Structure formats: structure tokens, C-alpha cells
Image (cartoon, helix red, strand yellow):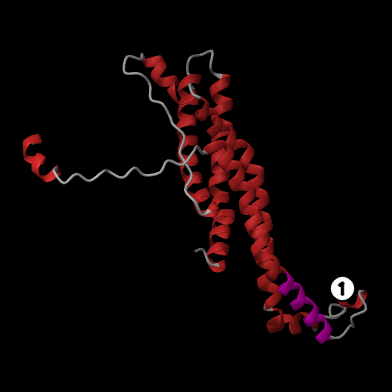
């Protein structure tokens, strides 16, 4: 069973650690598709599109692994049919973009990027606010000593204008961010994971256990 600590760590890793991959994937796919479609008439666009789709597939595989951790259950990998053995060179080059899943991988790299940015920004904000707020008593008195700072929002809310009120208020705000951190971060992770699940995953395939035969050891030498 996943503990709260493990849940927060998984969601945070997905939101923060997955952002660089989403950025690289977005830039690569947008550039590759634009270059491929733009040079399609010159017969060099097809290899560019195929290479871009191949790269998008690698990013999709990595995304599926992270999604399985966030959802806490295995997710299926869609089929990527290989080119027929009798296929010519052109057909083999076009194979990565000859099937629906290849285009879905490309589509995911593009439309998932804004959600990755949102997830990264919200998660980072919540973590910074929670850590800074909970540790505010350690350094808040230094900030309160700056002329005109110790009033601020607490004074506007009628909570007082002293150093104690200033520190208590900011610590309470940090505690609020800390309490709401698990559901907020998990919600941001689920937004990305749900999109990836819709575009990149298929039905999970349970492992098929081989049936045991008491005659297997007797038949093994004959088969050899």
C-alpha cells in the first residue's frame, strides 16, 4: 500500500522531474513535424517525420512508466506494428507514421506541454510556500526588522502590526500550504497522467503463467 510520503514523492517527481522531458519532447516534435511536413515534397520530409515519430515513441515509453507510478497500477503499451517483411524501403521509412499510435505519440508531446508547465509551476509554488512558511520563525524576525515590513497583510486584516503577529501569520500561511500540498500536487499529477493515459496507453496485459507439466523434465531430452 502506498504511504502518504511515497505518494507525495511520486507526484512531485512526476510534476518536477517530468517537466524537462516534456519540454525537450515538445521542442523536438514541433520542430521535426514542421520540418518534415515542409519538406515532404522534396522526399526528405518522410525520413524526418519517421525519425521524429521514433523519438516521440521513446518519450511515450518513459511517460508510460511514470504514469504507472502515479496511477499506482500497470498501464498497457499499445501495439506498434512493424513493417511487413516484403515492404519496400519507402514503406519501411513510413512505418513509424503509418499507424494511429505514432500520431498519438506526436499529439501527446504537443498538447501535454502546457499541462506540464502548469503542473510544474503549481507544484513548485506549493513546495516553496510550504517550506518557506513553516521555517519562517527561523528567519522571520530578520525580515520584520526591516522598516515598514512587519505590518503588511496581518495589519491590513486587523491581526496586529507587531513582529509576533507578522511571524505567526506567515507561519500559518506556510502551514496551510503544507496541509493542502498532498491533494494539490496529486491533482496536478493526475491531470497529466489522465491525458497520457488517454493518448499513450492501451489495455494492460496480464502476465501469462506457463502451465506446469509433470512430464516436462522427461520430454526435455527428447525435444533437445
Q: Residue at x 64, y 37 (%)?
A: 111
Which region shows up in magenta? 163-176
Residue 56: % across, % down: 50, 35
Label 1 SS: helix
Tell whether position 170 is magenta.
yes
Q: Residue at x 55, y 31 (%)?
A: 104
Q: Residues within 10 Å of mark 1 (few under 14, many from 20)?
A: some
Q: Is residue 48 left or right of residue 184?
A: left
- When the figure is inspected, residue 60 is found, relative to residue 33, above or below; the finding is below
Residue 66: % across, % down: 50, 50
Residue reaching furthest front?
214
Nearest to the observer: residue 211 or residue 167 = 211
Image quadrant where residue 138 sits: bottom right
Nearest to the observer: residue 132 or residue 11 = 11
* Residue of label 1: 153
Residue reaching furthest left?
221
Tell whether position 195 is magenta.
no
Q: Looking at the rendering, in which quadrant would you find the C terminus?
A: top left
Q: Main SS type for the magenta part?
A: helix
Number of numbered markers: 1
Amino acid at each position: 500500500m502506498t504511504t502518504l510520503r511515497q505518494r507525495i514523492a511520486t507526484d512531485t517527481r512526476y510534476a518536477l522531474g517530468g517537466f524537462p522531458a516534456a519540454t525537450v519532447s515538445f521542442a523536438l516534435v514541433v520542430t521535426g513535424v514542421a520540418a518534415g511536413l515542409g519538406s515532404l515534397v522534396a522526399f526528405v520530409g518522410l525520413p524526418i517525420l519517421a525519425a521524429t515519430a521514433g523519438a516521440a515513441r521513446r518519450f511515450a515509453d518513459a511517460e508510460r512508466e511514470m504514469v504507472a507510478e502515479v496511477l499506482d497500477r500497470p498501464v498497457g503499451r499499445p501495439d506498434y506494428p512493424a513493417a511487413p517483411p516484403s515492404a519496400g524501403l519507402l514503406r519501411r521509412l513510413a512505418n513509424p507514421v503509418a499507424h494511429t499510435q505514432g500520431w498519438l505519440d506526436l499529439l501527446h508531446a504537443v498538447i501535454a506541454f502546457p499541462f506540464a508547465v502548469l503542473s510544474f509551476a503549481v507544484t513548485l509554488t506549493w513546495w516553496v510556500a510550504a517550506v518557506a512558511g513553516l521555517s519562517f520563525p527561523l528567519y522571520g524576525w530578520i525580515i520584520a526588522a526591516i522598516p515598514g515590513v512587519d505590518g503588511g497583510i496581518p495589519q491590513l486584516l486587523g491581526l496586529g502590526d507587531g513582529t509576533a503577529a507578522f511571524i505567526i501569520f506567515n507561519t500559518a500561511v506556510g502551514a496551510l500550504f503544507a496541509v493542502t500540498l498532498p491533494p494539490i500536487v496529486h491533482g496536478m499529477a493526475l491531470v497529466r497522467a489522465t491525458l497520457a493515459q488517454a493518448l499513450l496507453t492501451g489495455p494492460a496485459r496480464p502476465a501469462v503463467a506457463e502451465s506446469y507439466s509433470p512430464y516436462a523434465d522427461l520430454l526435455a531430452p527428447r525435444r533437445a
